Amino acid sequence: MTDASAESSNPPPPPPPATIAFEGKHGKNPLEEASFTKMCGRLPSVLGHTARMAWAVDRSAVVLLLVCQLLTGVAAGVVLAFTAQAMRHLLGTGTVSERLHGALPALMVVTAASAAARVTSALSSYADGRITPGLMSEADTALVAAVCRVESSAYGEDGFADRQEAAEVGVTRTRMMVSDAQRFMASLIRMVAAGGVITALHWLMLPLLLLAVLPAGLGAVLCARVDYETHYANVGDRNVRGMMRWWATDPRHSDEVRANGMTGYLIYWYRTLSRRIDERTLTAAPRMLRIVLSTSAVGGLFLLATWATLAWLAGTGRVALPIAATAVVAVQTTLGALSQLVVYGAALFHTSLYLADMRSFLDLAGKRAPRRGEAVIPSRVDEIRLDEVVYRYPGKEEPAVAGVSLTLRRGKILAVVGENGSGKSTLTRLITGILLADKGRVLWDGTDLARAAPDSVWARAALVPQNFATWPLRARENITLGQPRSWDDAPVWEAVDAVGMRGAIERLPRQLDTLLARELFGGVELSGGQWQRLACGRALYRRTPLLILDEPTSQMDPRGEHQIFERIKAIAADRITIVVTHRLENTRVADHIVVMEQGRITEQGRYDDLVRANGTFAELLALSQDR
Ligand SMILES: Nc1ncnc2c1ncn2[C@@H]1O[C@H](COP(=O)(O)OP(=O)(O)OP(=O)(O)O)[C@@H](O)[C@H]1O
């Protein structure tokens, strides 16, 4: 190792972030195969889905919304029809006061209908405001629940994390879904009402108006397509950026970031990745501009043709002047409604692209939810047997566990040792049924875990994983994990005592009620070893027939470690206990020790037998003592 000062005076620049592409079978942009008509054909299903979700969230608000939409349309029709009537009087014969007098009733109806339209539009916004928050929370919760419930192996599958990221965007887009759908419906109803009136004036007007706005609609849909393509290309990078943001800003990593001088690199890394994402977005901007300009030009030509036709109809006496005047109003109204129709139609289409990602991820998560069987594990478990168990992680060449047979008995402590990556943690995941064996079987008193209901298995297991969580919950819930065993705190204190944490908890500002999260207001932080003691405390609190501790004391002082192992011995008679450890001295507590190498058990026996055997165990023990 060389001293830093001896390194090159002109060190290389920091490497840019690796290029991350949304790869695998899900890396293919779904739009590449979708035709324009197919894409438009999605709209009814998106509207239907929106309506169903909204209905489940707040029925009365949905009814209010629908009634308001209908009234808005009726009001638009009434305004136009009575405007035509008023025009007939105003542009007819007689004195000014006679003409005004004749038009007055129609004008009053127009005013009342306009006022009603305003009220219904305000009520629509109110209904939208009532539906949208619930809808977003529903979608968000559905996503979180789906991810929590999938088989653990799904996390490592091709594209799972990226599809989850795409689905997250779908959740945020649900915010726009109701208002887009509502505006689309409102403009559709207004368009039908105004279109009816304008067609009554002259049949040619409506097709011309349609031609005037359709190019804009086409442009909006094409822009939505480009926007979605950019989003799709950015999914992988955005996913990594989001993770990195968490790692860089989480207070738990702040010591490492600062003391190792990583701040500059992290910011450079974050900025480079953000720029890469921005670049893709900017590359799309000229394409969007071209689309908007060309479609606007075509639409403008058709609009010109509409006005010219109206002038020609009035000029040649084909329509009377009062009708032509009404037509001007009707053209404006229909044009407004049609423009909104295409704008919100395109917006809905745009939203539907993201929602489709959300739905397809929820479908995927549904398919990857455990479907194992209904067998239930009883509260007493006497034996767990592994028969030639093999497991390979998705995407890996070699199995992490490559044919392990083992019998664990109630009242006995098993220690699992072996070098890093030898498959110890994977073995514990297979024993608890977090992972299901690719080959072979794990039997709990004869029940194959592949046929057992997972919740019934996990109700019988307590696990202290190597990377345990430091939950931002109160101290009490960090022990009970939200599953209290009694109405008082006695069992909680018992678990706290078992791991020697009473003094530390009593010194907290609100004892068991203290929030253990430094980053939250009123929260406090524990030391690494104290957190690990709590993690052990919650496993002991569960009092389950299977207790697994994966490196349970790696951060503890000798007193804490001694206390934990004394406790493990004291309660071992009622359960099957597994301890995974690199501190080989700790395996003295075990009735049986297995040594793993490359996914296989290569040695097994009691501590003294293994020391005498002069194999891997003895070698590792000698290394741990050689200082
Ligand atoms: N979630 C995962 N996805 C893919 N591969 C994994 C995963 N977890 C572990 N592996 C791989 O499986 C093998 C066994 O890992 P495992 O964590 O079981 O080893 P271990 O013996 O517990 O190691 P350690 O002593 O470092 O905790 C390793 O090659 C590892 O890279």
Image (cartoon, grey):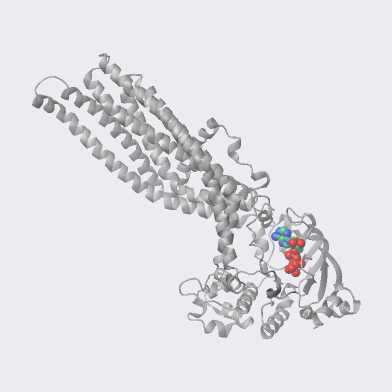
Task: Locate residue 274, reporting x and y percent.
Answer: 55, 55
In percent of width and height, residue 299 lies at 41, 28
Residue closest to the far front: 9
- In this orientation, which residue lies closer to the viewer: 492 or 88? 88
- The foreground one among 301 and 441 is 301
Q: Is residue 401 left or right of residue 85?
A: right
Q: Residue at coordinates 55% horizontally, 81% vertically from top-left?
A: 505
Residue 62 visible in the shown view? yes
User: Which quadrant would residue 482 be assigned to in this image?
Assistant: bottom right
Question: Quadrant of the image for the C terminus?
Answer: bottom right
Q: Residue at x 47, y 43 (%)?
A: 50
Q: Is residue 140 left or right of residue 432?
A: left
Q: Is residue 430 visible?
A: no
The quadrant where ligand 1 appears is bottom right
- x, y (%) of residue 419? 79, 70
Residue displayed at 35% across by 19% down: 203
User: Which one is nearer the viewer's eye here, 9 or 556?
Assistant: 9
Q: Quadrant of residue 230?
A: top right
Q: Using the image, determine if residue 263 lies above or below residue 200.
A: below
User: Which residue is nearer to you in this view: 557 or 253?
Assistant: 253
Name the residue located 59 percent from the left edge and 70 percent from the top edge: 257
Image height check: is 195 above or below 275?
above
Q: Position of residue 183 (x, y in %)?
A: 38, 40
Instruction: Decide: is 624 above or below 84.
Output: below
Q: Quadrant of the N terminus?
A: bottom right
Q: Residue furthest right?
A: 613
